[in-house]
Image (cartoon, rainbow, N blue to C red):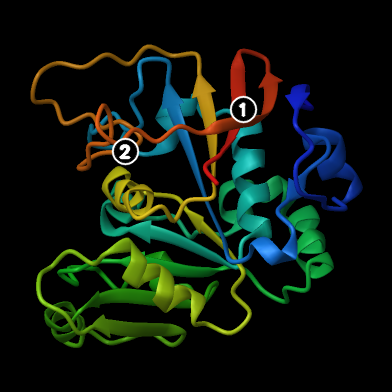
């Protein structure tokens, strides 16, 4: 079912979508070339602000969206226009069978996403960047071992040493950040990623602590947010996160976005904000 555009600010340059994607999503715009690199994020949240149920087998975004097909379509579209998709180790742990490609989330539209990437001058899927300071990753997981994507693991020197104890699959590159501490700053990640030839559009898919640091360092240009018509609830200590965790902005330093696009799919709202 196509999304209904309720309002759009028509910012940026229109992207020519393949016919089926154009019918399902509508018009789609990206920032002008002089605004590159373009760092954007995509999340789905319940009405009460929960982005993960933090329950075994139910920690990924599908349980938040209700496995909504339109949300999957939008996720695939955003991955299709990205040169790189960045996720933290926690996001990988929540959905260990995931590979961050357009067809990985919405296989029924794989030909359309592939056509769009060709139109944008991309010959293959987006590079998957996994951030793990400690390097405690299982390199037998599909994202590393399937050969479907080029993978860069950004880690610390200690993390790289730990990963070196495993067989490094073909297509997986480990980049050790030479600095103290297990936490890798968003600015460092961004510089590392944007040093890759041809990278202009960077999609951050989480988790909440990684995204918080990207916002803290004012690196996020736009936020795509799917609002699912679900109340998840919280109790003290259950660890259910919101979209941004680990950093505090308001009241001293609030971050205000500007709404630039609103679409509806049944009872789901698809929102887009700019932060520049």
Give the Cα distance between marks 1 and 2: 18 Å
Dot 1 falls on a residue whose secondary structure is: strand
Q: Residue furthest front?
A: 252
Vertical position of residue 234 compared to residue 26: above or below? above
Answer with the quarter of the image where residue 252 lies: top left
Q: Residue at x 50, y 13 (%)?
A: 229
Q: In the shown orientation, is residue 64 left or right of residue 114? A: left
Q: In the shown orientation, is residue 31 left or right of residue 64? A: right
Which residue is labeled 1 in the image?
A: 270
Vertical position of residue 85 compared to residue 66: above or below? below
Q: Please indicate, yes or no, whether residue 133 appears anywhere in the rendered image.
A: yes
Using the image as rendered, state which of residue 6 and residue 275 is in the foreground: 275
Q: Residue at x 37, y 11 (%)?
A: 231
Using the image as rendered, state which of residue 31 and residue 126 is in the foreground: 31
Using the image as rendered, state which of residue 225 and residue 31 is in the foreground: 31
What x and y, as percent, mark residue 37? Answer: 58, 66
* Dot placed on the residue nearer the N-terminal end, 1 or 2: 2
Which residue is labeled 2 in the image?
A: 244
Q: Residues within 10 Å of mark 2 (few under 14, many from 20)?
A: some
Vertical position of residue 18 compared to residue 35: above or below? above
Q: Are marks 1 and 2 in contact (CB under 8 Å)?
A: no
The N terminus - image quarter: top right
Vertical position of residue 33 compared to residue 13: above or below? below
Q: Residue at x 35, y 35 (%)?
A: 243
Mark number for residue 150?
A: none
Q: In the shown orientation, is residue 132 left or right of residue 67? A: left
Using the image as rendered, state which of residue 114 and residue 182 is in the foreground: 182
What x and y, as percent, mark residue 56? Answer: 23, 36
What x and y, as percent, mark residue 7? Answer: 75, 22
What x and y, as percent, mark residue 111? Answer: 79, 57
Q: Residue at x 31, y 74 (%)?
A: 154
User: How many numbered markers are drawn?
Assistant: 2
């Amino acid at each position: 079912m196509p999304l209904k555009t309720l309002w759009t600010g028509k910012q940026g340059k229109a992207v020519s979508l393949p016919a089926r994607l154009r019918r399902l999503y509508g018009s789609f715009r990206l920032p002008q070339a002089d605004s590159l690199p373009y760092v954007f994020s995509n999340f789905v949240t319940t009405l009460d602000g929960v982005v993960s149920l933090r329950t075994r087998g139910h920690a990924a975004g599908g349980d938040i969206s209700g496995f909504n097909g339109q949300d999957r379509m939008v996720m695939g579209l955003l991955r299709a226009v990205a040169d790189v998709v960045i996720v933290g180790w926690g996001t990988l742990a929540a959905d260990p069978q995931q590979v961050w490609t357009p067809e990985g989330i919405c296989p029924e539209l794989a030909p359309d996403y592939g056509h769009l990437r060709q139109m944008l001058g991309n010959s293959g899927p987006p590079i998957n960047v996994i951030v793990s300071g400690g390097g405690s990753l299982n390199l037998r997981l599909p994202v590393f071992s399937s050969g479907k994507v080029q993978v860069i693991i950004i880690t610390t020197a200690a993390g790289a040493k730990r990963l070196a104890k495993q067989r490094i699959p073909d297509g997986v590159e480990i980049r050790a950040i030479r600095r103290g501490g297990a936490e890798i700053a968003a600015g460092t990640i961004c510089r590392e990623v944007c040093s890759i030839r041809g990278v202009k559009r960077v999609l951050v898919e989480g988790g909440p602590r990684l995204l918080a640091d990207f916002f803290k360092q004012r690196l996020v240009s736009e936020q795509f947010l799917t609002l699912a018509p679900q109340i998840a609830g919280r109790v003290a200590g259950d660890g259910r996160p919101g979209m941004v965790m680990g950093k505090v902005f308001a009241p001293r330093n609030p971050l205000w976005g500007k709404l630039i696009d609103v679409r509806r799919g049944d009872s789901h709202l698809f929102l887009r904000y700019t932060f520049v």
